Image (spheres, grey):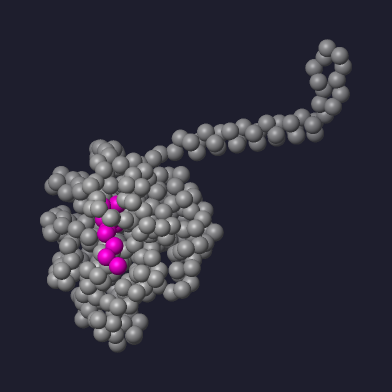
Amino acid sequence: MTATKNSSPCYTRREALGFLGTVASASLVTTRTAFLASQQTFTSVDPPDFPAGSVIRTLQGDLDPTALANGATLFHEHVGRAEVELAVEELRACAFDGLGCIVDAATGRRTPEQVRKLNAIADRSDVRVVMAGGYFEDIGFAIYPVRVAEMSEDELVEELVADAGAQGWGAFGEIASSLEMRPDERKVHRAVARAHVRTGIPIFTHTPHESCPSCAMEQMDVIEGEGVDLSHVAIGHMATIKPEDNPLATHTAVARRGAFVGLDTLGHEMGRSDIPAADKVRMVKDLLEAGFEDQILLSSDQGNIRQFKHFHGHGWASVLMQFVPKLRFAGVPEETIRKLLVDNPRRFLAFVPKI
């Protein structure tokens, strides 16, 4: 650079381009910082009363449920299917969209590698991670290993209680059944119900994606038959009931019995459940109009890595970024949306540990 007295500095072309690059980089950092500070948040609108001693069990430690008053909680997702680095990156991006807590659903007994991976993800994330566990069978999708059929119900109960304690589960789930509940599935549902009675840990289920209103009733019958208070149960995949099968009738039947209605295939398309988003918005509005806003849970059941933000999808934030705007457009009040995303899931996940 050369300059003469009382004259403007003169730059070579290379110096000028370098200077402009530095300014542009600084501007980008400033803009990014301002953008990050302006992201959406979800906060409690109607703080619940929790029983004394209640916790929400996360891999980062047991939380007082009041600690999750800021940030949405998604009760049915699949975190452990991603590699650690990708999952950490994804959770960081989803926190930017308003996510505060996420539940990792199990589709089979937890392996040591799954437990190690989920803990590694949780250790590096500001998003709270709840590990769920159990056994999973939905004929045509997945079946139990042979050992489950060979075990007695009492043995299953003992294994569930032991695994839940050793691995730090915050829920039993997703506990699945087929279009027609098979004897082994009935045995597992009874075992999970009994494990809940022993531990207090809440339960969420999987009903077949092919639209099965009767499956919800059967699951509740079996679980309640073992002495479970259904306010600690969420019946899953209730957004997969087809319009011609009258989803509102099933949803209100579930809610009247005290269970949560799990609308957990939201914000993205799933091959086994081709229900248009407009119909799922209608499900939420119908339940609200029927007076059951306290018993609605929202989630996406997202485990498809190709739909992650890293690959320009919405990933685990698909409920927050895809479905919630549709609820707003349909006239659902912001206070109600916050209740569905913040207050209802922490009421579901909160329990008083018994052992």
Q: Position of residue 285 (x, y in %)?
A: 20, 45
Task: Examine the rendered structure and indicate whether residue 351 appears above or below residue 25.
Answer: below
Tag count: 0
Q: Is residue 35 visible?
A: yes
Horizontal side of residue 203 vs 94, given as left or right: left
Tell me if residue 263 comes above or below residue 49 in the rendering.
Answer: below
Image quarter where the N terminus lies is top right
Q: Residue at x 43, y 52 (%)?
A: 127
Residue 117 is inside the magenta segment? no
Lateral position of residue 199 relative to residue 269, left or right: left
Image x and y of residue 200, in percent: 25, 64
Tell me which residue sits at (21%, 56%) in the image.
260
Residue placed at 47% from the left, 63% from the top?
A: 119
Reply above or below: 341 against 162. above
Residue 153 in which image quadrant: bottom left
Range of residues picked out in magenta? 345-355
Q: Nearer the viewer, residue 122 or 90?
A: 122
- The residue at the far bottom in this view is 150
Query: Can you name the residue that lies furthest to the top here?
Result: 6
Q: Quadrant of the C terminus?
A: bottom left
**Residue 316 seen in this snapshot:** no
Residue 350 among those drawn in magenta: yes
Image location (x, y in percent) of residue 13: 80, 30
Frontmost residue, 52 versus 50: 52
Vertical arrangement, residue 353 with respect to residue 93, above or below: below
**Residue at image x 28%, y 82%?**
155
Q: Position of residue 291 (x, y in %)?
A: 14, 46
